[in-house]
Image (cartoon, helix red, strand yellow):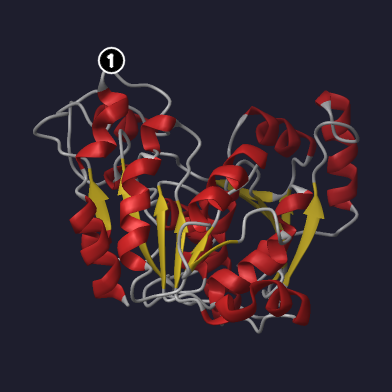
Amino acid sequence: MSEIKHILVIRLSSMGDVAMTVPVLFAFSNSYPEIKLTVLTKKQFAPLFRDLESVTVLFADFKNEHKGVFGLYQLSKSVRNLQIDAIADLHNVLRTKVLKFFLSGFKTAQIDKGRAEKKALVSEKTFEPIRTTPQRYSDVFRHLGFDLEIDPPSFLAPKSLDLDTKKVLGEFSNATVGVAPFAAYDSKTYPLSQMDTVISELQKDSKVLLFGGGSEETKQLETLASKYANVCCVAGKFNLTQELDIISNLKVMLSMDSSNGHMAAMFGVKVVTLWGVTHPFAGFAPFNQIETNNLLSDRNVYPKIPTSIYGNRFPDGYEFAIQTIPVKSIVKTVQENL
């Protein structure tokens, strides 16, 4: 370990997965401030790491510059120029394995994704919590020889809103509740009609901000927000840096099993999550949240849950499982966290 002064940290993939690395890297930086970290990730994820002083970001462009085997070879040359001492692969897929082949000679550790445990969970062979994703990230650094603990947790501090953000938000600059009602799959998305009722109740006592992405989601959220005096849609109005600043000042984020919950958790914001055909036992619950903040579909009605890790596979009829989470339970849980 004493020979390691600079680590390449590989974490590509989705916004949520990348956001889950932040508390781990923050804890590492606090414990080992003398160690430099370079995170290899996609350009759009860079704002997630802006507050980590010992972290720099190296962009991977797999559509152009780093496409294919030759592109990965070119990327490996850029990495070697950084004079790293070790590699922490928090992704561990074919692409990163090829990259590590080109970077042979460095001390390397990679994430154990627990594929066998996850397969057992979704195939109904077991039903018990497995190691969380942040714990698995921490294990990678332990395998490199660092004594890393993420409990008690470290969180990024709330950010001051810039003038443009304050101008757009206006009276909603001090909103306390965020709601992110969409997810990658319908099987993980609470019906908008039921979410409308949730928002209707929450906005009676709190200013509520609606988060989402894409033109169609934004249209739906704008329509929803227009019904209530205490609800504002932020979708499509801010860049990622500004959205992170807004999220950091919330007291509670209500989200699906999706990236907004993980981004809020980076700042120690309380996160209430709704689970459809996926389940927090698979290790993807937002970081450091109490168990009662995970609101689950009724397994008495849908006993095969979790049907998959990401929500992309499920038996007929299971796409409606998330509807069994009562509106009253959601409202009550959010209010208890305020």
| Residue 186 vertical position relative to residue 91 in the rendered view, above or below | above
How many numbered discs sit on the rendered protein?
1
Quarter of the image for the N terminus: give it.
Answer: bottom right
| Residue 24 vertical position relative to residue 337 in the rendered view, above or below | above
Local crowd size for mark 1, using a 10 Å CA cut-off: few (<14), some (14–19), many (≥20) = few
Q: Residue at x 33, y 33 (%)?
A: 118
Q: Nearer the viewer, residue 153 or 139?
A: 153
Q: Nearer the viewer, residue 224 or 155?
A: 224
Q: Position of residue 101 (x, y in %)?
A: 73, 34
Secondary structure category for the residue under label 1? loop
**Tag 1: residue type?**
Asp
Q: Is residue 131 visible in this depiction of the protein?
A: no
Quarter of the image where one finds residue 51: bottom right
Residue at mark 1: 316
Quarter of the image for the C terminus: give it.
Answer: bottom left
Q: Is residue 71 visible in this depiction of the protein?
A: yes
Q: Residue at x 61, y 75 (%)?
A: 29
Q: Nearer the viewer, residue 324 or 86?
A: 324
Q: Position of residue 26 (x, y in %)?
A: 57, 72
Task: Report whether 69 appears left or right of 118.
Answer: right
Task: Report whether 133 appears left or right of 88.
Answer: left
